[in-house]
């Protein structure tokens, strides 16, 4: 009779589970935007071992919660074997899952199982404390009942397994010496019972365990713990392209029935977006590290993913999945989407490699190209379209310092081809027009000259790379700017480019290849570091300063350039470099990325938050490697009234240490005088110069 009852339970449980799984696949593949994720097979398999089995991201920066999860994860793998053994015992009494390997193998399994279950119980207690006692920053549990149910089920599985094996020990059917913890249970609760009571106890714990096991299996797809089922495919199919690269919209091959561009409805998402949504554990690490959330903005990356999951679940019952727009007041608001700085801190810390940022920028595309974006950023896009730069300056006014610095300009006295030059220095809009950015760009040219590097700039033949347009969602404008620049570089036969703006660097390196560019692109951090290593630049002057280095998002997290700027600073005599608490992969954004430098931002601002951390470090100077960061920190310094902390580019510190003779002071004087009149401002003051 027992095998029959067990078979009915197993059959219904498995069929119900498969029904849920097939329903999920139906929903997932209703999303129509393609996502090709079968390249780099070795890296994908490696990811499973490192991040699933090794739990690398789980443990990083979240030690307490990481240890808890590590214990539960590995414990659950082993306990699953124990549960399978218990179920099969309903058909084959005395079944031992490793019995075919001999008695010693089974004994070791029982010992491991007994110890692991104890560790899992400890981890469950840690989990409860982590959610109720230990502070967790600004994270909020969005479904604490779900967590209680899951933890309760796991606890029930542990208790019933202990009870089942303790009962068998009382009956003399299990080796007590290999089940030390279960033996304690048996001695505490079952020592004085007779064989009949022990047999009843065995059956009682058996059926409760089986019921909980299959209830757990079928509850998983409806809970945030569905990641137990989806984590392996989600990590295997993660995006392995450069993080700073956005997908290209093919405007030349547009289907006749297309209604809009970007992600506006469910069908516009990819199957991987849906898989992400159902894999999210709602842990809140992404939100913990989000600069928008950290400065009281409405954006929570976790909530974006959760809302997508709820949207999918609710609309999956409709006859058509594409009947409702997702970016709307009822689901995800414009304020949430435009609060994102695209810093990728959310992706960096997500243990399941969910791409929160990608979903946000795709929905931005829909809103912007539907004409729903408002505010100062609209004027910025207009000026990008009409003049090729965010301020509306004429191309002929680009990089006026080049004449003072005697820098060759391609097509304007510097020749008609880049073949005569080792590299082309891409000045970027800040280096071309912003007085502070011009100072840094001019300093870089001095360093290149000192190192004997033969270089030129493109001058009027260079236009904005389109980074702000693409991040703000104006894909068509970005592609127009990108095509113009690629054609210009091909016209001059440009082979290698140095960019001191990480936003230009990222766009030129990672996104322009989609438009036919084959140019090698390096950041000024990497290039200057190589010049120092090769002995072409030899820092010698002792600067005697205590400084810190701020990792720009688009140089560090997006492109993994962490060491080279620090190598430059470490080569400068007299510099004591103090790392900020949030540095390298966990660096806190300056607030300028994602086009935010051209948008209004309500207080408190992201750059204020970062500058407060810099102030608290007690340093004299903050070094950066990004013109956006420099401007944002100068803005923050003015706001707090701090004129003591110096804000410098790493190139300027390197130049100071070389102790070069001052040249072209006329340019520096003019630049200083022009600051008050035409300094590029940020956020709500940014568009007008």
Image (cartoon, rainbow, N blue to C red):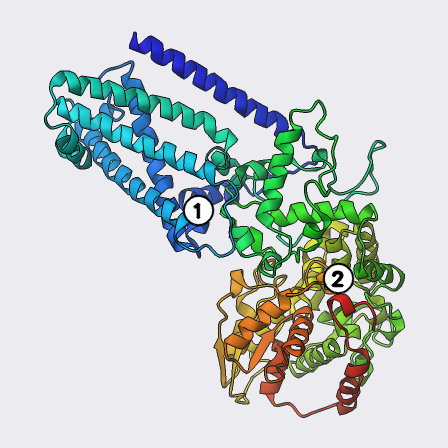
State the residue in front, 441 or 628.
628
Residue 560 percent coordinates (x, y): 56, 60
Q: Secondary structure at mark 2?
A: loop
Residue 321 percent coordinates (x, y): 70, 28
Quadrant placement of the N terminus: top left
462 left or right of 172 in image: right
Which numbered tag is attached to residue 369?
none
Can you tell which quarter of the image residue 323 is in? top right
Please rate how many residues cluster around mark 1, counting C-alpha atoms within 10 Å: few if below 14, some from 14 to 19, many from 20: few
Answer whether labels 1 and 2 touch (C-beta < 8 Å).
no
Please rate how many residues cluster around mark 2, counting C-alpha atoms within 10 Å: few if below 14, some from 14 to 19, many from 20: many
Q: Residue at x 55, y 51 (%)?
A: 286
Residue 86 percent coordinates (x, y): 29, 23
Q: Which residue is mark 2?
A: 599
Q: Residue at x 46, y 54 (%)?
A: 136
521 left or right of 55 in image: right
| As drawn, 261 above or below 617 | above
193 left or right of 372 in image: left
Q: Which residue is mark 1?
A: 50
State the residue in front, 497 or 501.
501
Dot 1 or dot 2: first in sequence order is 1
Q: Residue at x 76, y 51 (%)?
A: 473
Let me know if residue 533 appears in the view. no
Let me know if residue 188 appears in the view. yes
Q: Nearer the viewer, mark 1 or mark 2?
A: 2
| As drawn, 327 above or below 177 | below
Can you tell which quarter of the image residue 249 is in? top right
Residue 204 percent coordinates (x, y): 26, 20
Give the CA separation, mark 1 to mark 2: 40 Å
Q: Secondary structure at mark 1?
A: helix
Q: Residue at x 54, y 71 (%)?
A: 613
Quadrant placement of the C terminus: bottom right
């Amino acid at each position: 009779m027992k095998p029959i009852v067990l078979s009915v339970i197993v059959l219904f449980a498995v069929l119900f589970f498969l029904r849920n799984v097939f329903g999920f696949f139906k929903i997932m593949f209703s999303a129509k935007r393609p996502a090709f994720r079968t390249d780099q097979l070795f890296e994908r398999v490696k990811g499973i071992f490192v991040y699933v089995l090794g739990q690398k991201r789980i443990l990083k920066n979240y030690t307490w919660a990481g240890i808890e999860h590590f214990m539960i994860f590995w414990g659950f793998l082993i306990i699953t074997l124990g549960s399978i053994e218990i179920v099969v015992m309903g058909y084959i009494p005395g079944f031992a899952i490793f019995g075919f390997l001999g008695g010693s193998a089974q004994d070791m399994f029982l010992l491991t199982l007994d110890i692991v279950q104890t560790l899992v119980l400890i981890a469950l207690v840690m989990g409860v404390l982590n959610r109720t006692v230990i502070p967790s920053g600004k994270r909020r549990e969005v479904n604490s009942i779900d967590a209680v149910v899951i933890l309760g089920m796991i606890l029930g599985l542990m208790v019933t397994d202990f009870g089942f094996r303790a009962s068998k020990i009382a009956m003399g059917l299990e080796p007590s010496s290999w089940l030390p913890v279960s033996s304690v249970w048996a001695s505490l609760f079952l020592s004085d019972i007779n064989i009949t009571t022990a047999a009843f106890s065995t059956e009682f714990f058996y059926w409760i365990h089986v019921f909980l096991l299959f209830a757990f299996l079928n509850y998983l797809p409806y809970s945030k713990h569905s990641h137990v089922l989806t984590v392996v495919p989600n990590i295997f199919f993660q995006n392995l392209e450069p993080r700073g690269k956005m997908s290209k919209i093919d405007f030349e091959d547009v289907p006749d029935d297309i209604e809009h561009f970007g992600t506006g409805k469910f069908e516009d998402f990819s199957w991987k977006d849906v898989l992400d949504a159902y894999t999210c554990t709602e842990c809140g690490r992404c939100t913990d590290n989000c600069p928008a959330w950290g400065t009281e903005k409405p954006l929570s990356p976790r909530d974006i993913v959760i809302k997508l999951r709820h949207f999918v679940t609710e609309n999956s019952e409709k006859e058509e999945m594409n009947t409702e727009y997702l970016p709307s007041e009822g689901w995800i608001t414009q304020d949430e989407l435009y609060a994102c700085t695209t810093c990728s801190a959310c992706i960096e810390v997500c243990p399941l490699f969910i791409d929160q940022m990608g979903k946000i920028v795709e929905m931005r595309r829909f809103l912007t190209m539907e004409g729903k974006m408002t505010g100062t950023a609209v004027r910025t896009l207009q000026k990008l379209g009409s003049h090729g730069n965010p301020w509306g300056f004429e191309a002929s006014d680009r990089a006026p310092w080049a004449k003072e610095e005697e820098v060759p300009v391609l097509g304007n006295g510097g020749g008609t081809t880049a073949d005569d030059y080792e590299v082309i220095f891409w000045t970027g809009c800040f280096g071309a027009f912003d007085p502070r950015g011009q100072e840094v760009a001019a300093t870089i040219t001095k360093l290149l000259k000192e190192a004997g590097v033969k270089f030129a700039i493109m001058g009027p033949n260079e236009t904005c790379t389109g980074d702000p347009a693409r991040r703000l969602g104006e894909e068509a404008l970005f592609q127009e700017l990108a095509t113009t620049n690629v054609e210009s570089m091909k016209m001059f036969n440009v082979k290698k480019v140095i960019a001191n703006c990480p936003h230009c660097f990222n766009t030129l390196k990672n996104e322009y290849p989609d438009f036919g560019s084959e140019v090698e692109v390096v950041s000024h951090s990497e290039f200057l570091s190589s010049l120092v290593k090769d002995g072409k630049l030899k820092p010698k002057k002792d600067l005697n300063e205590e400084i810190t280095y701020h990792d720009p998002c688009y140089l560090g997290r997006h492109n993994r350039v962490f060491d080279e700027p620090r190598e430059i600073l470490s080569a400068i005599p007299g510099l004591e470099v103090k790392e900020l608490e949030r540095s390298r992969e966990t660096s806190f954004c300056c607030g300028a990325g994602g086009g935010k430098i051209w948008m209004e931002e309500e207080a408190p601002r992201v750059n204020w938050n970062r500058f407060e951390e810099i102030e608290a470090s007690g340093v004299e100077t903050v070094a950066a490697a990004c013109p956006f960061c420099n401007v944002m920190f100068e803005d923050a310094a003015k706001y707090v009234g701090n004129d003591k902390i110096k804000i410098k580019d790493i190139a300027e510190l390197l130049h100071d240490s070389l102790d070069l003779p001052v040249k072209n002071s006329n340019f520096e004087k003019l630049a200083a005088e022009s600051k008050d009149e035409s300094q590029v401002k940020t956020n709500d003051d940014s568009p007008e110069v």
